[in-house]
Image (cartoon, grey):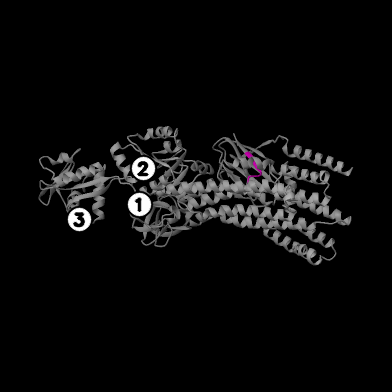
Amino acid sequence: MDKIIILIIALLLIGFIMWWFFSKRKTDAIEAKIKNNTQEVEIVVSGGYTPNIVVLQKDIPAKIIFNRKDTSNCFNEVVFPDFGIKEQLPINEAFPIEIDTKNAGEYQYSCGMNMFHGKIIIK
Amino acid sequence: MSTKNRFIFSLILSLSMLIEMITKPLFNIGLPWHPWSMFVLTSGIMAVSAWPFIKSAWAAFLNHHANMDTLIAIGTGVAYIYSIYAAFNHQPVFFEVAALVITFILLGQVLEEAAKGKASGAIEKLLELQSKDAEVLKKDIWVKIPLSEVSINDLIRVRPGQKVAVDGVITEGDSALDESMLTGESMPVLKKVGDSVIGSTINKNGTFIFKATKIGEDTLLSQIIKLVKHAQTSRAPIQKLADKISNVFVPTVLIISIITFVVWYVFLNASLITALLYAIAVIIIACPCALGLATPTALMVGVGRGAKMGILIKSGEVLEAANDITAVVFDKTGTVTIGKPVVTDIIGDEKQVLEVAASLENVSEHPLSLAILDYAKKLSIEIKSISDFTATQGEGVSAILNNQKAFVGNSKMLNNIRLDENLTKEMQRLQDEAKTVVIVGLNNQAIGLIAIQDAPKETSFKAIEKLKSKGLRTIMITGDNQRVAEAIAKRVGIDEVIAEVSPKDKSEHVKSLQQQYKVAFVGDGINDAPALATSNLGIAMGSGTDIAIESGDIVLVKNNLEDVVTALSLSQKTFNRIKLNLFFAFIYNTLGIPIAAGVFISFGIILNPELAGLAMALSSVSVVTSSLLLNKSKLD
């Protein structure tokens, strides 16, 4: 009897994992605030990058301020392959990274081991 | 707390449990107050050393993400919580699994961090090359100012042993400069007035003054650093598969682990503890660290090693392109050859022939005159004064030297003078070698010949030979006429010549070659930009400061054709190392998971969670070590 209960629990657990991790989720894009001809946006690093998608205006100098709360090794570095940026993120400290907004497009960034991803869109 | 301290803490606490694992079965000596002593020790480890894993796993979970921290937290958490339940119910516990897995994984991370530090050293080394200050002339006084305050057109003095601060041109003095840090060239290079100097190179003996032409981000060193950084952060296309897998990897492993538990417990009637241990082993062995490290570490080491040799590889994609090149196409002038005409042969009395020629050409501005004057200077030939100088377009020059009529020019200058048999024969031979021959005459007699040619670089022959031995087709493309091109090609051993091609048609020829080959194009980066872009792999050669960084996939700082061979070899080695790393990481996970799940138990192969933790730690360390070994691998 208890084996049947365990089997049911296991199946429910698998179902939950698939729903929680694999189902498509809508992520909202956040637009950077423009002030004195520069745009800034803060990204909190904790189990991922929040907000995950950031929209920047083309041709306005942009700063992305990373605020790393997660101490995991996974978030030691942030890498923007298209911009040649690889920086060590300090823990519990605002860390600004300047982004070249000359070219419009979608640019992925990730952690040093390419496990966590975020995106910036330059319009 | 740093990873290292977390490791030391968990090592100290888990040491007694490690000892017990040996003494218990052998001498039946266990920890006192078992299992509550184990509970206390493991709780300490979970609270201090494992806490960051748990916190990060939870944060990731809330974002619908799962990473290696998720696996570590769930694997050790299940072992820990089950053991507490078991302790209360007087059943066997396995606290030590949680404690030792945490210890081993932290050991792996400590080793990995140390090795990664070594792998990423190239940029730091380049930055250290930068000079801190410069001695600048300000209102007739030499003052030392910080590097950041140097501006363009400043005059900067460099004494022996000092570093050149920025890029510039020598205006006074001469010296030998050690440029090895940027070009990899081990011999010091002699520089005189008018020559360009590169920031961060070291002045060996003389004092000189130079005018700053490039500062800040425009200097060669800054450009190189930027390029290397870009390349090291780029992704190789081969990694895409790994990226795709890593997104679904962790949740999939969790599902496999649940299935493992159910199969053992429900269908195979194993005990609850056995089934749990298999499930935990699956979670622990599957940490995808090695997968994540495989590409970036190899790229970092390979690109960094290239930068030290003056070979700048622009991205991970370039490595993949370099791997399937089947033909190398060279531009002739400046690439295979030196790029300016030089005297190659002198027939007749060398001293006399040169003296006459140099004295006459001293006032001429013909490109061939420069070659003759350079050569005369090298041999310290005295230049005499002349009178009645006349230059005849398309023929040559004549003048009075030592009261004798002298001339230098082609056969049209001969008029009634006849060349003797020997000179006629020599002239024919030199012309067959596609050299330009000028006749030197004195007192109505031809006294000798000077052969001039844009000669191949000394390194060209060896480089072509090495490329051919790798099975690559070598092709030269040039605007020169067929005869000259073929003569040069023959001397350096190039397989095929495409001559009389205008610069803008070069890329068309590259395109048609691409129907048959995967083409690497080697050119100077300025005139050849379209061909470099068209080819599968553009290799831009520069000399010192004038490198055209934009145009090539690989940029060679030195003007040496052998670097083409080294660059291809390094790219291939790095790419193969990435493949090897990825292969190893995949094999490790695809084989490790079924072993941990107990699939091979009938062969007696099992993996308990502690061993899984150790194997997992070693897998990432071994991938980083494999990347570091790229620094040692032999290059052609």
Q: Which residue is mark 2?
A: B494
Q: Which residues are magenta?
A: A112-119
Q: Secondary structure at mark 3?
A: loop
Gap between marks 3 and 2 measured at Cα: 39 Å
Mark nearest the camera among 3 and 1 is 3
Q: Which residue is mark 3?
A: B382
Q: Which mark is residue B34?
A: none
Report if residue A114 lies within the magenta region: yes
Can residue B121 be seen in this snapshot?
yes
Chain for numbered disc 1: B
Three-letter amino acid code of the residue under disc 1 = Asp
Q: Which mark is residue B195?
A: 1
Residue B483 x/y as whole percent = 28, 38
Gap between marks 2 and 1 measured at Cα: 32 Å
The quadrant the N terminus of chain B occupies is: bottom right
Mark nearest the camera among 3 and 2 is 2
Front in this rendered view, residue B554 or B614: B614
Chain for numbered disc 3: B
Q: Is residue B305 left or right of residue B84?
A: left
User: Is the residue at mark 2 from the same chain as the one at mark 1?
Assistant: yes
Marks 3 and 2, the one that precedes in the sequence: 3
Determine contact: label 3, label 1, CB under 8 Å.
no
Three-letter amino acid code of the residue under disc 3 = Glu
Chain for numbered disc 2: B
